[in-house]
Amino acid sequence: MKTTMQRKVIVIPCSGIGKALGSISREATYEVVESLRKGVTETTCLALITSGDEETLQLVKTNKCITVDGCPLQCAQKNVKLVDGELAASFRVVDTLKENRRLKPKSVTFLDRDGQELASLLAKQVAEKVDELLKE
Amino acid sequence: MVDLPEKKVGIISCSGEACVEGTISRVATRLVLEKLRTEKTVTICLPLFLAGGKEERAFAKCYPTITVDGCDKLCAKIATERYSGKPASSIVVTDLNGNKNCSTTGPKRKLDDQAMGLAEKVAERIAQEVDEVLNHWK
Protein backbone atom coordinates (compact mmCIF):
# COMPACT_ATOMS: atom_id res chain seq x y z
CA MET A 1 0.00 0.00 0.00
CA LYS A 2 1.29 3.39 -0.98
CA THR A 3 1.91 5.65 2.00
CA THR A 4 1.40 9.37 1.84
CA MET A 5 2.54 12.01 4.35
CA GLN A 6 -0.42 13.45 6.16
CA ARG A 7 0.13 16.99 4.96
CA LYS A 8 0.74 16.31 1.31
CA VAL A 9 -1.47 17.99 -1.23
CA ILE A 10 -2.51 15.94 -4.26
CA VAL A 11 -2.42 17.90 -7.51
CA ILE A 12 -4.47 16.30 -10.27
CA PRO A 13 -4.40 17.58 -13.85
CA CYS A 14 -6.98 16.67 -16.47
CA SER A 15 -4.23 15.88 -19.02
CA GLY A 16 -6.82 16.36 -21.76
CA ILE A 17 -5.42 14.94 -24.96
CA GLY A 18 -7.33 16.83 -27.63
CA LYS A 19 -6.17 20.40 -27.04
CA ALA A 20 -3.12 22.31 -25.80
CA LEU A 21 -5.06 23.22 -22.64
CA GLY A 22 -4.80 19.67 -21.32
CA SER A 23 -1.06 19.54 -21.96
CA ILE A 24 -0.67 22.83 -20.10
CA SER A 25 -2.57 21.47 -17.09
CA ARG A 26 -0.24 18.49 -17.07
CA GLU A 27 2.93 20.58 -17.39
CA ALA A 28 1.81 23.00 -14.66
CA THR A 29 1.18 20.06 -12.34
CA TYR A 30 4.62 18.57 -12.98
CA GLU A 31 6.19 21.96 -12.32
CA VAL A 32 4.50 22.09 -8.93
CA VAL A 33 5.16 18.50 -7.78
CA GLU A 34 8.67 18.17 -9.24
CA SER A 35 10.01 21.69 -8.67
CA LEU A 36 8.01 24.43 -6.96
CA ARG A 37 6.55 22.38 -4.09
CA LYS A 38 8.47 19.16 -4.33
CA GLY A 39 8.05 16.97 -1.26
CA VAL A 40 4.80 18.46 -0.02
CA THR A 41 2.78 17.62 -3.11
CA GLU A 42 2.29 14.64 -5.34
CA THR A 43 0.20 13.77 -8.33
CA THR A 44 -1.75 10.72 -9.35
CA CYS A 45 -3.24 9.40 -12.57
CA LEU A 46 -6.71 10.85 -13.13
CA ALA A 47 -7.43 7.72 -15.16
CA LEU A 48 -7.07 5.67 -11.94
CA ILE A 49 -9.93 7.67 -10.46
CA THR A 50 -11.99 7.19 -13.60
CA SER A 51 -11.38 3.44 -13.56
CA GLY A 52 -12.12 3.22 -9.81
CA ASP A 53 -8.74 2.08 -8.46
CA GLU A 54 -9.24 1.56 -4.71
CA GLU A 55 -5.79 2.75 -3.63
CA THR A 56 -6.17 5.98 -5.59
CA LEU A 57 -9.69 6.59 -4.30
CA GLN A 58 -8.33 6.28 -0.78
CA LEU A 59 -5.54 8.73 -1.62
CA VAL A 60 -7.92 11.46 -2.82
CA LYS A 61 -10.32 10.90 0.07
CA THR A 62 -7.66 11.26 2.76
CA ASN A 63 -5.61 14.14 1.35
CA LYS A 64 -6.46 17.65 0.18
CA CYS A 65 -6.71 17.76 -3.59
CA ILE A 66 -6.19 20.54 -6.09
CA THR A 67 -7.53 19.88 -9.57
CA VAL A 68 -6.03 21.55 -12.63
CA ASP A 69 -8.37 21.40 -15.60
CA GLY A 70 -7.74 22.53 -19.12
CA CYS A 71 -11.21 23.37 -20.31
CA PRO A 72 -14.61 24.30 -18.81
CA LEU A 73 -15.72 20.65 -18.84
CA GLN A 74 -13.51 20.28 -15.74
CA CYS A 75 -13.04 16.54 -15.90
CA ALA A 76 -10.52 16.43 -13.07
CA GLN A 77 -12.72 18.40 -10.69
CA LYS A 78 -15.82 16.38 -11.58
CA ASN A 79 -14.06 13.04 -11.22
CA VAL A 80 -12.69 13.96 -7.78
CA LYS A 81 -16.12 15.17 -6.65
CA LEU A 82 -17.86 12.07 -8.00
CA VAL A 83 -15.70 9.78 -5.86
CA ASP A 84 -16.07 12.03 -2.78
CA GLY A 85 -12.45 13.13 -2.86
CA GLU A 86 -11.32 15.98 -0.61
CA LEU A 87 -11.45 18.75 -3.18
CA ALA A 88 -9.76 21.82 -1.69
CA ALA A 89 -9.27 23.99 -4.79
CA SER A 90 -9.76 23.98 -8.53
CA PHE A 91 -7.90 25.76 -11.31
CA ARG A 92 -8.68 26.08 -15.01
CA VAL A 93 -6.13 26.77 -17.73
CA VAL A 94 -8.77 28.76 -19.64
CA ASP A 95 -8.92 31.25 -16.76
CA THR A 96 -5.15 31.78 -16.76
CA LEU A 97 -5.35 32.13 -20.54
CA LYS A 98 -7.98 34.88 -20.21
CA GLU A 99 -5.67 36.73 -17.82
CA ASN A 100 -2.84 36.45 -20.34
CA ARG A 101 -4.43 37.00 -23.72
CA ARG A 102 -1.11 37.73 -25.43
CA LEU A 103 -0.28 34.02 -25.10
CA LYS A 104 -1.50 31.76 -27.92
CA PRO A 105 -0.57 28.16 -27.12
CA LYS A 106 -1.16 25.81 -30.04
CA SER A 107 1.00 22.72 -29.88
CA VAL A 108 -0.52 19.72 -28.04
CA THR A 109 2.05 16.91 -27.97
CA PHE A 110 5.01 19.08 -27.00
CA LEU A 111 4.20 22.53 -25.67
CA ASP A 112 5.37 25.57 -27.61
CA ARG A 113 6.86 28.64 -25.87
CA ASP A 114 3.48 30.23 -25.13
CA GLY A 115 2.20 26.96 -23.72
CA GLN A 116 5.25 26.64 -21.47
CA GLU A 117 4.86 30.20 -20.22
CA LEU A 118 1.19 29.68 -19.47
CA ALA A 119 2.00 26.46 -17.60
CA SER A 120 4.59 28.30 -15.49
CA LEU A 121 2.15 31.09 -14.63
CA LEU A 122 -0.50 28.58 -13.64
CA ALA A 123 2.01 26.51 -11.65
CA LYS A 124 2.85 29.55 -9.51
CA GLN A 125 -0.85 30.06 -8.73
CA VAL A 126 -1.21 26.40 -7.78
CA ALA A 127 1.93 26.54 -5.62
CA GLU A 128 0.55 29.53 -3.70
CA LYS A 129 -2.65 27.61 -3.09
CA VAL A 130 -0.63 24.64 -1.81
CA ASP A 131 1.00 26.94 0.76
CA GLU A 132 -2.40 28.19 1.89
CA LEU A 133 -3.72 24.66 2.29
CA LEU A 134 -0.69 23.51 4.24
CA LYS A 135 -1.14 26.37 6.72
CA GLU A 136 -4.74 25.36 7.48
CA MET B 1 -27.13 8.69 -52.30
CA VAL B 2 -26.83 8.92 -48.54
CA ASP B 3 -23.60 10.53 -47.39
CA LEU B 4 -22.39 8.24 -44.61
CA PRO B 5 -19.82 9.55 -42.13
CA GLU B 6 -16.28 8.43 -42.74
CA LYS B 7 -15.17 5.42 -40.75
CA LYS B 8 -12.66 6.33 -38.09
CA VAL B 9 -11.02 4.60 -35.17
CA GLY B 10 -11.14 6.14 -31.70
CA ILE B 11 -7.91 5.98 -29.72
CA ILE B 12 -8.24 6.32 -25.98
CA SER B 13 -5.06 6.86 -23.99
CA CYS B 14 -4.67 6.54 -20.23
CA SER B 15 -2.26 9.53 -20.15
CA GLY B 16 -1.27 8.41 -16.65
CA GLU B 17 0.41 11.29 -14.88
CA ALA B 18 2.17 9.22 -12.25
CA CYS B 19 4.42 7.09 -14.45
CA VAL B 20 6.64 7.43 -17.48
CA GLU B 21 4.61 4.91 -19.45
CA GLY B 22 1.56 7.18 -19.09
CA THR B 23 3.43 9.93 -20.89
CA ILE B 24 4.57 7.40 -23.49
CA SER B 25 0.97 6.26 -24.11
CA ARG B 26 -0.08 9.89 -24.47
CA VAL B 27 2.73 10.86 -26.85
CA ALA B 28 2.24 7.69 -28.92
CA THR B 29 -1.47 8.48 -29.26
CA ARG B 30 -0.72 12.03 -30.37
CA LEU B 31 1.83 10.79 -32.91
CA VAL B 32 -0.85 8.59 -34.47
CA LEU B 33 -3.40 11.42 -34.50
CA GLU B 34 -1.00 14.02 -35.87
CA LYS B 35 1.26 12.02 -38.16
CA LEU B 36 0.71 8.33 -38.73
CA ARG B 37 -3.06 8.01 -39.27
CA THR B 38 -4.30 11.60 -39.20
CA GLU B 39 -7.41 11.11 -41.31
CA LYS B 40 -8.39 7.78 -39.84
CA THR B 41 -8.36 8.45 -36.12
CA VAL B 42 -10.05 10.55 -33.43
CA THR B 43 -9.67 10.66 -29.67
CA ILE B 44 -11.53 11.55 -26.50
CA CYS B 45 -10.24 12.48 -23.05
CA LEU B 46 -10.67 9.36 -20.91
CA PRO B 47 -11.98 11.23 -17.81
CA LEU B 48 -14.91 12.47 -19.92
CA PHE B 49 -16.50 9.05 -19.50
CA LEU B 50 -17.23 10.01 -15.89
CA ALA B 51 -17.39 13.78 -16.25
CA GLY B 52 -19.15 14.03 -19.58
CA GLY B 53 -22.58 13.17 -20.86
CA LYS B 54 -24.30 10.63 -23.06
CA GLU B 55 -22.29 11.59 -26.13
CA GLU B 56 -19.00 10.70 -24.49
CA ARG B 57 -20.36 7.45 -23.15
CA ALA B 58 -21.66 6.54 -26.60
CA PHE B 59 -18.19 7.10 -28.05
CA ALA B 60 -17.27 3.42 -28.32
CA LYS B 61 -20.65 2.66 -29.82
CA CYS B 62 -20.03 5.15 -32.62
CA TYR B 63 -16.37 4.32 -33.19
CA PRO B 64 -14.37 1.14 -32.89
CA THR B 65 -11.78 1.96 -30.23
CA ILE B 66 -8.20 1.10 -29.40
CA THR B 67 -7.19 1.69 -25.79
CA VAL B 68 -3.59 2.58 -24.96
CA ASP B 69 -2.55 1.97 -21.37
CA GLY B 70 0.75 2.72 -19.72
CA CYS B 71 0.64 -0.10 -17.20
CA ASP B 72 -1.20 -3.26 -16.31
CA LYS B 73 -3.78 -1.37 -14.26
CA LEU B 74 -5.45 -0.91 -17.65
CA CYS B 75 -7.39 2.24 -16.73
CA ALA B 76 -8.23 3.12 -20.34
CA LYS B 77 -9.46 -0.38 -21.15
CA ILE B 78 -11.44 -0.78 -17.93
CA ALA B 79 -13.10 2.65 -18.10
CA THR B 80 -13.91 2.29 -21.80
CA GLU B 81 -15.52 -1.11 -21.23
CA ARG B 82 -17.38 0.08 -18.15
CA TYR B 83 -18.76 3.35 -19.45
CA SER B 84 -18.75 3.15 -23.24
CA GLY B 85 -18.18 -0.19 -24.96
CA LYS B 86 -15.71 -3.01 -25.54
CA PRO B 87 -12.58 -1.79 -27.32
CA ALA B 88 -11.62 -3.44 -30.60
CA SER B 89 -8.03 -3.66 -29.44
CA SER B 90 -5.97 -2.92 -26.36
CA ILE B 91 -2.29 -1.98 -26.16
CA VAL B 92 -0.20 -1.84 -22.97
CA VAL B 93 3.13 0.01 -23.03
CA THR B 94 4.74 -2.19 -20.37
CA ASP B 95 4.03 -5.24 -22.59
CA LEU B 96 6.09 -3.64 -25.34
CA ASN B 97 9.07 -2.50 -23.28
CA GLY B 98 9.40 -5.72 -21.32
CA ASN B 99 8.99 -4.03 -17.94
CA LYS B 100 6.49 -5.64 -15.65
CA ASN B 101 5.91 -2.49 -13.60
CA CYS B 102 5.59 1.11 -14.69
CA SER B 103 8.35 3.59 -13.88
CA THR B 104 7.42 6.21 -11.31
CA THR B 105 10.82 7.81 -11.58
CA GLY B 106 12.11 8.97 -14.93
CA PRO B 107 11.33 11.48 -17.65
CA LYS B 108 7.60 12.01 -17.20
CA ARG B 109 7.64 15.63 -18.38
CA LYS B 110 10.02 15.38 -21.29
CA LEU B 111 10.72 11.96 -22.73
CA ASP B 112 14.39 11.17 -23.19
CA ASP B 113 15.63 9.52 -26.39
CA GLN B 114 15.00 6.00 -25.11
CA ALA B 115 11.46 6.77 -23.95
CA MET B 116 10.76 8.69 -27.17
CA GLY B 117 11.94 5.66 -29.13
CA LEU B 118 9.46 3.52 -27.22
CA ALA B 119 6.68 6.07 -27.85
CA GLU B 120 7.40 5.80 -31.59
CA LYS B 121 7.32 2.00 -31.36
CA VAL B 122 3.98 2.14 -29.53
CA ALA B 123 2.66 4.60 -32.13
CA GLU B 124 3.62 2.22 -34.95
CA ARG B 125 1.81 -0.57 -33.15
CA ILE B 126 -1.31 1.57 -32.72
CA ALA B 127 -1.18 2.46 -36.43
CA GLN B 128 -1.03 -1.24 -37.34
CA GLU B 129 -4.03 -1.92 -35.13
CA VAL B 130 -5.90 0.99 -36.75
CA ASP B 131 -5.33 -0.59 -40.17
CA GLU B 132 -6.45 -3.99 -38.86
CA VAL B 133 -9.62 -2.57 -37.38
CA LEU B 134 -10.45 -0.67 -40.56
CA ASN B 135 -9.75 -3.74 -42.71
CA HIS B 136 -12.14 -5.79 -40.62
CA TRP B 137 -14.77 -3.16 -41.20
CA LYS B 138 -14.68 -3.45 -44.98
Image (cartoon, helix red, strand yellow):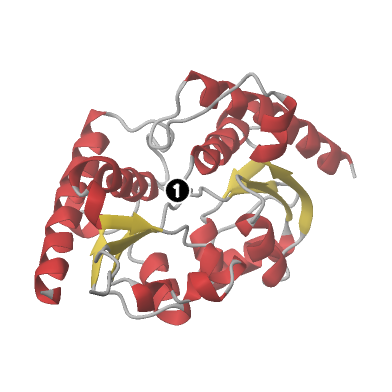
* Residue drawn at (53%, 34%) of the image: A27
Quick one: B120 or B138, which is closer to the camera?
Answer: B138
Residue B69, x across and y down, in percent: 33, 60
Q: In the figure, is residue A72 to the left or right of B89?
A: right
Is residue A2 among what the camera can see? yes
Front one among A105 and A111? A105
Q: Amino acid at mark 1?
A: Gly
Q: Quadrant of residue B79?
A: bottom left
Residue at image coords 69%, 43%: A92
Q: Is residue B23 left or right of residue B116?
A: right
The count of marks equals 1
Q: Is residue B70 visible?
A: no
Spot occupied by residue A73 in the image (x, y as percentages of width and height): 64, 56
Q: Is residue B33 above or below residue A32?
A: below
Give percent across and percent down for residue A52.
54, 73
Q: Residues within 10 Å of mark 1 (few under 14, many from 20)?
A: some
Q: Residue at x 71, y 27 (%)?
A: A124
Q: Is residue B69 above or below residue A112?
A: below
Give how far across and how far down residue A37 sits, in percent: 67, 31
- Nearer to the camera, A68 or B37: B37
* Residue located at (67% from left, 63% from top): A78
Query: Which residue position is annotated with label 1?
Result: A18
The part of the image, by quadrant, that contains residue B54 is: bottom right
* Side of B137 relative to B44 (left or right): left
Please identify the quadrant where the N terminus of chain B is shown.
bottom left
> In the rendered structure, the residue with mark 1 lies on which chain?
A
Q: Is residue A128 above or below residue A15?
A: above
Quadrant holding the C terminus of chain B: bottom left
